Image (cartoon, rainbow, N blue to C red):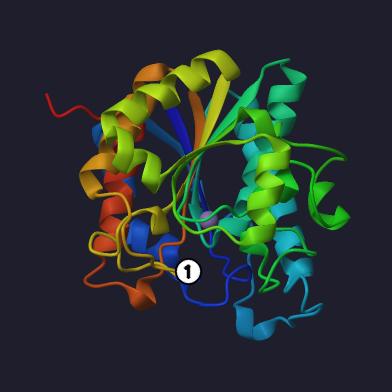
Amino acid sequence: MNVSIFEMPLDFGASRHGSDMGPSAIRLAGIREKIESLGHTINSYMTPISINPQEYESVGNPRAKYLEPITKACQTLAGEVYHTAESGDFPLVLGGDHSIALGSLAGMGRFAKEKHKRLGVLYVDAHGDFNTDETSPSGNIHGECLAASCGYGLKELTDLYYEGVKIEPQNVCFVGTRDLDSGERELMKKAGVTVFSMSDIERHGFPAIVKKIIVFFKSHADIVHVSFDMDVLDPMFAPGTGIPLPAGLTNREALLLMEEMADTGLVRSAEIVEVNPVLDVRNQTAILAVSLAARLLGEKIY
Ligand SMILES: [Mn+2]
């Protein structure tokens, strides 16, 4: 397979800055060498656009902080992701905070639409990212990116790249969720997304949940985008992330999930976000991000 890697050094979407250094940390952890060792070809490896550090931009509307630089960067990313998917290559986007999903999902949304395929999204995240400008307690856009991609929220976000819904909410499956704001929870229920929370995992066991996720995508999607937020992991395994929350997935569970998703043959694109080296210990979060990407791209132990 040909893989194109996009580095998105963007941290405007979060209140704890430093995830703009995530792509460098993942690069230093050896993403390129790892992917090539699996027999894939890296077709391009680039920073698609130059993104100013947060200190050089103004916050703008406090209800939608850094809206302008985020939409500008995501617009460019969307085009890159679309053209990569169109050429048959696998776009792998490295964040950056989760607001970059606005770009990836817009790019894959256009690709799916043009090919008349149903796009599914596996959203691996401790949080819902399903706020709108009206429900968000913080005004941080990384908490609104999935809602916006599903058509809810500010027009500047919902109509990014092209007008209209990028992903049908009934084709979205969450896993590892453990912290939702009340407004976003309500909107998620109304929108009809599927959620496998940490409580569901505790109740049924992780392998049983993985089976349900696979069944979900086999019946809801022709192609799948995996959006992986490192904060889904327990901080024991991923301390280098903006909003660490206890009681998360173990490294073993997350690796298994990526392996099983690879085996579906449906995954056509992915992003790994919220690696924040400022908060990390000896780059372990970036190193784990590389292992997760490798499993998703077909790495087998035996
Ligand atoms: Mn997130």
Residue at point 51%, 77% (across, down): 16
Tag 1, which secondary structure? helix
> Mark 1: which amino acid?
Ser
From the viewer's perspective, tell me whether residue 218 is left or right of residue 284: right
From the top left corner, tell me how far across and down residue 52 is, in percent.
64, 74
The answer to whether residue 186 is seen in the rendering is yes
Measured along the vertical axis of the image, is residue 203 above or below residue 223? below
From the top left corner, tell me how far across and down residue 87 is, in percent.
61, 25
From the top left corner, tell me how far across and down residue 86 is, in percent.
65, 25
75 vs 122, nearest the viewer: 122
From the viewer's perspective, tell me whether residue 293 is left or right of residue 83: left
Which residue lies under the disc numbered 1? 19
218 vs 183, nearest the viewer: 183
Residue at point 27%, 29% (across, down): 207
- Count neighbours of disc 1 (C-alpha within 10 A) and say few if under 14, some if 14 to 19, many if 20 or more: many
From the viewer's perspective, tell me whether residue 2 is left or right of residue 263: right
Measured along the vertical axis of the image, is residue 158 above or below residue 67? above
Quarter of the picture containing the N terminus is top left
From the viewer's perspective, tell me whether residue 94 is left or right of residue 191: left
Measured along the vertical axis of the image, is residue 107 above or below residue 234? above
Residue at point 58%, 71% (across, down): 14
Quarter of the picture containing the C terminus is top left
From the top left corner, tell me how far across and down residue 6 is, in percent.
52, 49
Q: Quadrant of residue 205?
A: top left
Q: Quadrant of residue 144?
A: bottom right
The answer to whether residue 1 is seen in the rendering is no
